[in-house]
Amino acid sequence: MLENLDPAAPDALLALIKLHAADPRSDKIDLGVGVYRTAQGDTPVFAAIKAAERRLVETQVSKSYLGPEGDMGFVHALMPHIFGTDPTMGGRIEGMQTPGGTGAVRLAAALAKAAGVTRVHMGTPSWPNHAQILADLEVEPVPFEHARADGTANVDAVLQAIRGAGPGEAVLLHGCCHNPTGIDYTPEQWDAIAAALADGAVLPIIDVAYQGLGHGMEADAVGLRTVLAAVPEALVAYSCDKNFGLYRDRVGAFYVMARDGGQLPAILSNAAALARANWSMPPDHGAAAVRLVLDDAELAAQWQDELGVMRARMRQVRDRLAEQGLAGTIDLTPLAAQNGLFSMLPLSREQIAMLRDDHAIYMAGSGRINVAGLTADNIERFIAALTDVAR
Ligand code: LMR
């Protein structure tokens, strides 16, 4: 039976981690998978998380099961940061913990399917796993162009997709720090998107995987909150992988905003059943540490400071690249206005291979770079290599 399985292609992003690790060149540069790096090239555990983990070890009295919804203290502690001063929108929002942002996207898409969604409009390019998850669930992705060649968002494309969509359709939006382009909608564009969504029948699914890495926790929530204030119902997938630095601990959450709070128990009972069939229960440790951070004013302030340092460093890298202007034929100017870990460079497959083979510079095959992989020690070499391959 098992001989029927043909080898599956490895996930291209995750394969890059191994390729980079196996490269013996000491001056190699990793701009591949989306993890934050300090100016020294490290991805440390947040000090606020370390302190919370110590407290967790001292105070946790049991590791007995919690249930498919996970740690509801964690789920609720995040809500004011995501949804603002009325975190339940008058009792219409509730959530559950998921294994990372991937678990949250998976749960949102599976629940949408169970509710009758058969097609999901999504801007392309997108995080490659979005399409993989939809394919696995046998939900049809309907692409629209996310960004224009000048490095700005194509808001007309998303508006057209929303206005043309009917019942049984959803639209998948990135809340902030778009992956892979770094190109976000402006607040005015979010207003237009929210108005189009309010008029239509399409279900919004909003993926928030990088809150706080763009302009701050509040500013990065503007798009999400604008949409939620306008629409009757929505699904939200949330990740703490990056903004709490918990990558491998798999910390995420799924939220639903219902038309009426009375619908929440039925909706969440379906989400819980899907979670039970998929992973039964989410891993506890990282989410418990986030809860302890958010419930303690001092640790929460320390976490915000640490997040601010990350954000400032990524801005510095972006500003240096943009100041360069042209690197060969590649215009780096738009990178200053883009947000988060990623930007996309218009490089051919051959140029990306040359960067890897001749210059030990690793990036996704799409031309996506993780700007946090650049430091004062390697950024000039990166610009020179780019200039060399893009002549
Ligand atoms: C990325 O896009 O690099 C990150 O979101 C990591 C992942 O799981 O793909």
Image (spheres, rainbow, N blue to C red):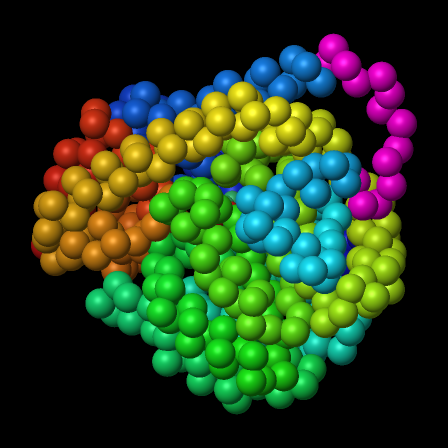
Question: Which x, y percent locates residue 33?
Answer: 45, 41
Tell me if 94 is positioned left or right of 102 in this view: right
Q: How many marks overall?
A: 0
Question: Which x, y percent locates residue 154?
Answer: 34, 73
Is 358 in front, or is 329?
Answer: 329
Q: Is residue 182 above or below residue 119?
A: above
Q: Quadrant of the C terminus?
A: bottom left
**Residue 180 is at least partly visible in this image:** no
Q: Is residue 264 above or below residue 64?
A: below
At 49% across and 81% down in the image, what residue appears? 196
At 60% across and 73% down in the image, what residue appears? 231
At 46% across and 70% down in the image, what residue appears? 123
**Residue 305 is at least partly visible in this image:** yes
Which residue is situated farthest in the right direction here? 64
Question: Which x, y percent locates residue 387?
Answer: 12, 47
Is 23 in front, or is 262?
Answer: 262
Question: Which x, y percent locates residue 226?
Answer: 49, 65
Image quarter for residue 35?
A: top left
Q: Is residue 69 magenta?
A: yes
Is 44 in front, or is 227?
Answer: 227
**Secondary structure of the magenta portion, mostly?**
loop
Is 116 in front, or is 206?
Answer: 206
Tell me if 369 is positioned left or right of 275 in this view: left
Q: Is residue 185 above or below residue 287?
A: below
Tell me if 359 is positioned left or right of 344 in this view: left
Residues shaded magenta: 57-70
Q: Is residue 170 magenta?
A: no
Q: Quadrant of the N terminus?
A: bottom right
At 42% across and 68% down in the image, what residue appears? 190
